[in-house]
Image: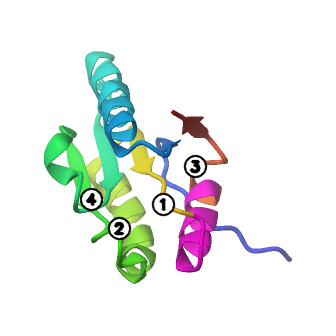
Amino acid sequence: MKYTHYAPRGSLRIVRGDDPAAVTRRVQELLAAAEARGEVTGVLAYDEHLPQYRASVVIPLGPLGALENAAHRLYAGLRRFDEEGATFMVAEACPEEGLGQAVMNRLLKAAGNEVIDV
């Protein structure tokens, strides 16, 4: 029997791009639109970008240069979204090299492969 990865009850999107400013702008646009719809919002973000986000639930993944933190915090963060009643969540992508490949694999499964490229 094939096992499944944990996915939050709400809708999760991943924003991916080479320009960090464009990624943070798009993440915040998505969060603002969801909030305007009356959704409880959540964001999974790296420490470098946390101050730029406004969401009901903000989950720090640690520094982008230390992806072992993200690997350890990811599932706890997704569970916290459920505990807080988040209905729309956005996660920042990370480079898909080394440990980043494993982090992105888990994120993609949790998001049902819903990726927004900027």
Inspect the image, locate mark 4, and give the three-letter code of the amino acid beneath it.
Answer: Ile
Q: Are marks 1 and 4 in contact (CB under 8 Å)?
A: no
Question: Which residue reaches farthest front?
Answer: 19
Q: Secondary structure at mark 4?
A: strand
Q: Marks 1 and 4, how far apart in space?
A: 15 Å
Local secondary structure at mark 3: loop
Is 95 left, or right, of 31 in this rendering?
A: right
Instruction: State the separation of the CA atoms marked 4 and 2.
Output: 14 Å
| Label 2 vs 3, first from the N-terminus | 2
Residue 109 vs 5, above or below: the answer is above
Residue 63 visible, this angle: yes
Task: Residue 35: give x, y in percent of width and height.
Answer: 27, 24
Task: Check disc 4 and report the residue beneath it.
Answer: 59
Up the image or down, 16 lies above or below 37; here it is: below
Left or right placement of residue 58 versus residue 42 in this view: left
Q: Nearer the viewer, mark 1 or mark 4?
A: 1
The image quarter containing residue 90 is: top left
| Quadrant where the N terminus is found in the figure | bottom right
* Residue drawn at (51%, 33%) of the image: 118
Q: Amino acid at mark 1?
A: Cys
Q: In the drawing, what numbered circle is on residue 94?
A: 1
Front disc: 2 or 3: 2
Give, as a single range, the part of the protein colored magenta. 96-108
Q: Residue at x 36, y 45 (%)?
A: 20
Q: Nearer the viewer, residue 74 or 96?
A: 96
Could you give the CA–CA distance between mark 2 and mark 3, rounded to whole angstroms?
Answer: 20 Å
What residue is shown with label 2? Answer: 64
Mark found first going from the N terminus, 2 or 1: 2
Q: Nearer the viewer, mark 4 or mark 2?
A: 2
- Discs 2, 1 touching: Cβ within 8 Å: yes
Q: Which residue is mark 3?
A: 111
